[in-house]
Amino acid sequence: MTSEEIRKNINSIINQKINIDKLYTLTEFGALCGVSRTTVSKWCNDTCPTADKVPAICEHLHISIFELLGLKDPSVITEAEQKLLKEYAAHPEMQDAVNRLLGLK
C-alpha cells in the first residue's frame, strides 16, 4: 500500500465517522484529540494527522490503527490460516518436512 493510499484511507475513515456517522462534531472531536476543528476538517479531506494524534483518533473512533491505516491486522487469522494451523498440528509426522520447506529448520 502506498503512502497516498494510506492517506486516502485515513481521510475516508475520519470523514465517515465524523461527517456521515455523526459520531462527533468537528469541534468535539478536535477537543478530544487536542486540535482545532479546522485540523479535523483537513483530516477528513486531504491531510494526515501527525503520529502523536493517531492513538487518540483510534481510541475515540473505536478502531484499530490497522483499520485507520487500511492495513490487515497481523493478529487476525483468516479461516484458511486457522485450518492450515489445525492441519499442521494434527500431522506431527509432517511437521519436520513443512518446517524445512518453510526454512524454519
Image (spheres, rainbow, N blue to C red):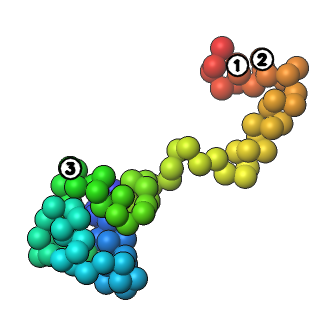
Taking 11 as reference, is 93 left or right? right
Q: Which residue is mark 3?
A: 52
Q: Position of residue 18 (x, y in %)?
A: 31, 78
Q: Nearer the viewer, mark 3 or mark 2?
A: 3
Would you place residue 93 above or below residue 67 in this image?
Answer: above
Q: CA distance from mark 1 to mark 3?
A: 42 Å
Would you place residue 12 above or below residue 70 in this image?
Answer: below
Q: Are marks 2 and 1 in contact (CB under 8 Å)?
A: yes
Q: Earlier in the sequence, mark 3 or mark 2?
A: 3
Amino acid residing under circle 1 = Arg
Which residue is at 59% across, 48% downward? 76
Residue 29 vs residue 76, the one in the foreground = 29
Q: Which residue is mark 2?
A: 96
Q: Secondary structure at mark 3?
A: helix
Residue 19 vs residue 95, the one in the foreground = 19
Q: Position of residue 87 (x, y in %)?
A: 83, 36
- Quarter holding the C terminus is top right
> Label 3 crowding class (10 Å Cα cut-off): few <14, some 14-19, many 20+?
few
Q: CA distance from mark 2 to mark 1?
A: 6 Å
Q: Secondary structure at mark 2?
A: helix
Amino acid residing under circle 3 = Asp
Which residue is at 30% across, 52% downward? 55
Residue 27 vs residue 100, the one in the foreground = 27
Q: Are marks 1 and 3 in contact (CB under 8 Å)?
A: no
Amino acid residing under circle 2 = Asp
Which residue is at 87% across, 27% downward? 91
What number of labels is visible?
A: 3
